[in-house]
Image (cartoon, rainbow, N blue to C red):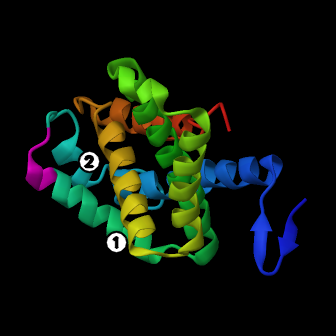
Amino acid sequence: MMLAERHKFIVTKDVFEIILDYFFKNVQTKFLNKFAFQDKERSKISSELSQIAGTFPYDPFIYEELSDFSYKFFKTLESHEKTALYFHTITEKSSAFEEEFEMGLEQDEDIKLFDEGKYDEEYGKFIENLINNGESEMLINYSVQQLRDVLINFCSEFELDDYEEDLETIKQTILDYQKNKPQNI
């Protein structure tokens, strides 16, 4: 159920999970297929994946190429696809924000005095800023960075040696990425 209050919406946990599921099964899958294959039949490995796979650590030029590819893909997304990407990005940024806070607690005794209420307030401001500014430059940049990070992780999984075997491995990996949803929503 979605509740409206003067054009602001509250998204329930069920709706949130549906949107993230859509991201993983549709938007991310479309993105990975576009990057990994030259054709819609998925019968030819793209030159981008062939050149990058198995070459960790990447030099800055490759990061730039992956960012450019991610931005071009982002620009082709329809509004509902961007919304799903934004939800995913906010989820990932929220997790990173929480991890930073927890690491700070472990490393600095003074931060332990930083009460939970203050954390919730800072965290709330961060998320509110991302959500309420719509398609802000910050949210777009975070989203493109998130797509790039997906590509980095994806490319790191391959050492392309046997073309036929590699095609099937890539297809299976893309299917596996559909299941890569956060567990604690």
Locate the C terminus and report the quarter of the image it occupies: top right
Q: Identify the residue position indicated by label 2 in the image.
A: 49
Q: Nearer the viewer, residue 135 or 34?
A: 135
Residue 71 shows in the view = yes
Q: Residue 183, position in %: x, y? A: 65, 31
Q: Secondary structure at mark 2?
A: helix
Task: State left or right for residue 27 relative to residue 12.
Answer: left
Is residue 147 shown in magenta?
A: no
Q: Secondary structure at mark 1?
A: helix
Task: State left or right for residue 171 relative to residue 56.
Answer: right
Locate the N terminus and report the quarter of the image it occupies: bottom right
Residue 85 shows in the view = no
Q: In the image, is residue 147 above or below residue 183?
A: below
Q: Identify the residue position indicated by label 1 in the image.
A: 72
Residue drawn at (81%, 81%), measured in percent from left and top? 6
Task: State left or right for residue 59 relative to residue 173.
Answer: left
